[in-house]
Structures are given as structure tokens and as C-alpha cells.
């Protein structure tokens, strides 16, 4: 119970997963705090978070519960396969296209493991999302996290053939001011400043358009429908470009490369199932790197001689 409360940050949410009422959950938590003689959770108007003692209990509870599950499995089934639940969060569009297939492949090999997959384009902390693993694009937000590289990402500017036919192609980044750009929302601000590099000179353009969304999948679908120009990870548009659903734009310009990482919490021992998933995911994306590399190679072939190589 305590593990679920900390992972979800909510007595009611944890109670729904356990089939217990809020009153029953509150009673059990009160009994635990009376047993230990101290507070285990800090409460505010929005969520719960562990005290220092509660965090110690939570971290050790994870190990205890994993050992109990492993022992139960050995006794009942005569083997010690991986088992338990893995919490995983990743960007929406990447998750639907690639990570859901990664999970399918891992579970085929590890049938006693469950995966709780949470798609969001927000950057969540591990306690907030109840996750063991996060897959993210971009710079690492927290140096306390342990990162494993899954490859290199580069944004691309794309639109559908229908949009290109109706409105023409921008020839310079400044031309984007005359186009309808589909803008990603993150938290309470818009990612509407698109950066381009040519011959070592950097240009940042503030774009605008009539469609903004905090969901990358929705933005990509709008672009495929011919409703505007999109700034997207090469991973997320590789298939669309190869299938001619989207057309790369401004190919004489580079967009800055970014990291593509699998993150786990530092400073704690990871369960074996999480370690195994991390290694599986690294190898999985290593083999999947072909679509992204193919699109980047096509983009590079279209560039004039002397342009810097992609990182």
C-alpha cells in the first residue's frame, strides 16, 4: 500500500488500484505511522510526498517486495524468471510508434513481468509518475539521473504534399513567418522558437500558427492532414517521410542535434527486471536506428557540398 501511495502521490488513486476506499487507506496509513511513531508522508493540497523516513521505507519496501515476489515465483513455479512491474514514461508520439513495440518484444521474452506505460510530452519526475524508467529527447534535466544513450536525434521541418502544393515551400527560415506552423506546448509555454544553422551561423525564428497542442501525436496527424508545418524529431517522422506522407523542408539548413536517452534514478539499486529492460531497450533502439539514419542520409545527400556532417 505504501509503495503505491508514494508512486501515485495520492491515497485515492492508490486506493482505487487496491480496491480500497479513501477511509480505509487513511486508516491503514495512520496505523503505519503510529507503529513507527513518526510521520511517513507530507501532505499538501495537491499531493503526498514521503518524509525522509518515508523515503527510506519506500526504497527498502521496493527491495523487500521484489524479494518476496521472487521467492513466491520460485516456490510456485520452480524457476526464477524476471517478474514484477516496470513503470515507463516516454513522449507520446515516440511511445505509440516505437516504445509500445519495444514493450511487446520485451514481454514476449519475459511473460511474468508487467509494464505500466505512461505516454506524456511533459517532463515528469520519477516519484510523480511512479516510473522506473524515462525515455526522453533533449538535454538531461537532472544530473542525478543515470543516462544511457539510445542514439542521436535531430529535429526536422516537414509538411504534407497537400500543404506544399497549396502554399509553396519556405526557402529560408524567415519565410516561416508567412506559413501556418504547428506548435508544441510544454507545461505553460509554447515551443515556438525554432533554431536553424547554416555555414556556422545560427538563426532562431519565432513561429506562429492556428494550432497548438501538448500532444506530439496530434501535431503530427495535423501535419499529415496538410494543416501546417511541423518541427519534429527525425525518429517520429522517419516513417512518414519514407512513405511520402511528409516532405522535409529547408534542407539547406541544419536543426540542432539533441540527445536521445533512457534515464533511471541514480543512487539506488535497480531491480533486475529494470536492469534487463534497460539493456533490452538499448539494443532494441540500436537496431531501430536504421529509419532515422536513412532519413538523415537522404537529407544529407540533398545538401550542398561543404555543409558540416550531422553530429
Image: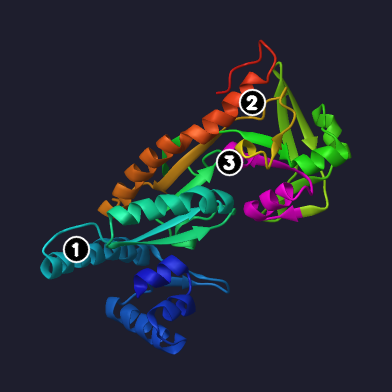
Which residue is the extreme one toward the top? 306
Image side of residue 94 versus residue 299, left or right: left
Highlighted magenta segment, given as a residue range: 212-240
Image side of residue 225 versus residue 234, left or right: right
Asked if 112 appears above or below 154 in the picture, the reply is below
Q: Find residue 239 and name its label.
A: 3
Point out the tag, 2 or 1, that comes first from the N-terminus: 1
Q: Tag 1, which secondary structure?
A: helix
Asked if 139 appears above or below 225 in the picture, the reply is above
Asked if labels 1 and 3 touch by Cβ distance under 8 angstroms, the answer is no
Instruction: Judge depth for marks 2 and 3 and give the one in front.
Output: 3
Asked if the magenta segment contains residue 29, the reply would be no
Classify 10 Å Cα crowding around label 3: few (below 14), some (14-19), many (20 and above). some
State how far apart marks 2 and 3 are (Cα). 14 Å
Q: Position of residue 2 (x, y in %)?
A: 35, 73
10 and 293: which one is in front?
293
Image side of residue 256 versus residue 192, left or right: left
Q: Find residue 70 and name its label.
A: 1
State how far apart marks 3 and 1 are (Cα). 41 Å
Dividing the picture into quadrants, the one containing residue 281 is: top left
Asked if 209 appears above or below 150 in the picture, the reply is below
Q: Position of residue 199 (x, y in %)?
A: 71, 16
Reading the image, the residue beneath label 2 is 299
Q: Residue at x 43, y 76 (%)?
A: 14
Point out the tag, 2 or 3, that comes first from the N-terminus: 3
Q: Residue at x 27, y 62 (%)?
A: 112
Q: Quadrant of the N terminus?
A: bottom left
Amino acid at each position: 500500500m505504501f509503495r503505491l501511495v508514494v508512486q501515485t502521490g495520492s491515497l485515492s488513486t492508490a486506493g482505487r488500484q487496491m480496491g480500497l476506499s479513501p477511509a480505509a487507506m487513511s486508516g491503514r496509513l495512520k496505523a503505519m505511522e503510529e507503529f513507527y511513531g513518526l510521520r511517513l508522508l507530507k501532505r499538501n493540497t495537491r499531493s503526498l510526498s514521503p518524509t525522509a523516513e518515508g523515503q527510506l521505507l519506500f526504497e527498502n519496501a521496493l527491495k523487500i517486495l521484489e524479494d518476496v515476489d521472487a521467492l513466491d515465483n520460485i516456490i510456485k513455479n520452480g524457476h526464477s524468471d524476471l517478474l514484477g512491474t516496470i513503470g515507463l514514461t516516454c513522449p507520446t508520439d515516440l511511445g505509440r510508434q516505437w516504445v509500445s513495440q519495444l514493450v511487446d518484444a520485451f514481454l514476449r521474452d519475459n511473460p511474468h513481468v508487467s509494464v505500466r506505460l505512461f505516454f506524456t510530452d511533459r517532463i515528469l519526475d520519477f516519484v510523480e509518475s511512479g516510473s522506473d524508467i524515462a525515455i526522453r529527447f533533449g538535454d538531461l534535466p537532472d544530473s542525478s539521473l543515470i543516462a544511457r544513450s539510445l542514439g542521436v536525434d535531430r529535429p526536422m521541418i516537414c509538411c504534407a504534399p497537400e500543404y506544399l502544393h497549396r502554399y509553396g515551400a519556405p526557402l529560408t527560415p524567415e519565410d516561416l513567418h508567412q506559413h501556418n506552423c504547428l506548435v508544441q506546448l510544454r507545461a505553460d509555454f509554447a515551443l515556438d522558437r525554432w533554431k536553424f544553422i547554416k555555414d556556422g551561423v545560427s538563426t532562431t525564428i519565432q513561429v506562429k500558427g492556428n494550432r497548438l497542442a501538448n500532444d506530439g501525436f496530434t501535431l503530427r496527424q495535423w501535419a499529415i492532414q496538410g494543416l501546417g508545418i511541423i518541427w519534429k524529431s527525425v525518429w517520429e517522422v522517419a516513417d512518414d517521410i519514407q512513405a511520402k506522407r511528409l516532405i522535409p523542408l529547408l534542407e539547406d539548413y541544419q536543426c540542432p542535434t539533441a540527445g536521445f536517452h533512457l534515464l533511471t534514478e541514480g543512487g539506488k539499486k535497480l531491480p533486475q527486471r529494470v536492469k534487463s529492460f534497460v539493456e533490452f531497450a538499448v539494443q532494441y533502439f540500436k537496431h531501430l536506428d536504421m529509419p532515422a539514419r536513412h532519413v538523415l542520409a537522404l537529407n544529407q545527400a540533398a545538401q550542398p557540398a561543404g555543409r558540416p556532417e550531422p553530429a
